[in-house]
Amino acid sequence: MSEPIFSSQDNPRQDNAYPPNESGDEVNVGRSAASRSKRSRDEARHEAEMREARGQYEELAELAGSLAHEIKNPLSIIHMNIDLLSEDLMEIDSPSSRRCQNRVDMVRNQCERMEGLLRDFLRFARLRHIDLVPGSLNDQIQQVLDAYQAQADSQDVELQRYLDPDLPSIRLHSDALQSALMNLVKNALEAMPDGGQLWARTYSTRGGVNLDLIDTGTGVDDNTVLHMFEPFYSTKDGGSGLGLPTARKIIEAHGARISVQSETGRGTKFSLQFPVPARLG
């Protein structure tokens, strides 16, 4: 937020805004009271609208979750019977059975894809509230990078860690936050199949605690950046399009924000900004 041109001490009009009598003070008090009243009404209306929106969202999420469960059960039965049919076909060695086997394999692959999509969707739909406790952001990203160190080494990706040792604590849910960070690191590694570098940097700002994840991968275009957090949007073959939206929901459930910058051929930067409660600073 930009600073005013004049402070209350420097404003040359301050002392002469009203005549020396008290009418100016009375007008100021009236305007201030009216402003506070309007602001209170606006805040109350906004809170009511937010409660209504949350209620509608929760109702829709519950309905979608129930529908996903209803789809999951018959899909599991289809998958099981496809496996049994495949076993029967393997006992018959003929051109027609081999053609049928190829079709059975195709159906099985699509069943597995749908089951994965349903798992991702249910995880996305169930994420509404998580309990937060004080913890170290450095510890969370360290554990995630350690988990992916072997894969990074196999891809010739260098993991660079620049973690502020004096970083304040934040309120977090360890399992959920690590799940979100794993998604971001996994995406970064997938963008560097021929090697590269991934920097993880933590630092404090006036507003809280930040984490930057910067890779030297393939990057994405502006249209992908615009839509990448939308459910079911994916540029990957067979991707559910729910990984990044779920990561964003987790991060926002921490009271944090996530932003992204990317350039095709140069890489991508994800920035996470976490608040630091005063009592935890």
Image (tube, rainbow, N blue to C red):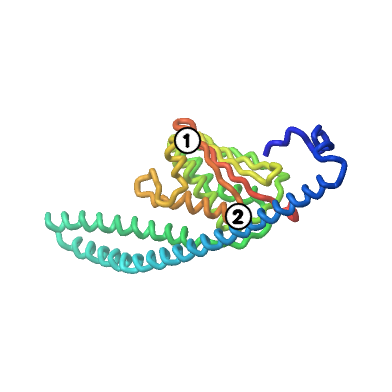
Q: Position of residue 158 (x, y in %)?
A: 54, 37
Considering the image in quadrants, where does the N terminus appear?
Answer: top right
Left or right side of 69 for 158:
right
Please identify, in this view, whether the residue under mark 2 or under mark 1 is nearer the observer.
Answer: 2
Q: Nearer the viewer, residue 273 or 182?
A: 273
Q: Position of residue 145 (x, y in %)?
A: 56, 46
Write the residue at 52% across / 37% down: 261
Q: How many discs mark residues in the rendered view? A: 2
Circle number at residue 123: none
Q: Nearer the viewer, residue 226 or 104?
A: 226
Q: Residue at the left extreme?
A: 95
Q: Position of residue 81 (x, y in %)?
A: 26, 67
Circle number at residue 217: 1
Q: Nearer the viewer, residue 131 or 62?
A: 62
Q: Residue at the right extreme?
A: 20
Q: Secondary structure at mark 2?
A: loop
Q: Residue at the top extreme?
A: 265
| Amino acid type, mark 1 | Gly
How many residues crowd around disc 2 within 10 Å: few (fewer than 14), some, or many (20 or more)? many
Left or right side of 40 for 145:
left
Q: Position of residue 33 (x, y in %)?
A: 74, 54
| Amino acid type, mark 2 | His
Earlier in the chain: of badge 2 and badge 1, it is 1
Q: Secondary structure at mark 1?
A: loop
Rounded to the nearest angstrom, the CA distance separating label 2 from label 1 is: 28 Å
* Residue identifier under label 2: 254
Q: Is residue 212 above or below residue 76?
A: above
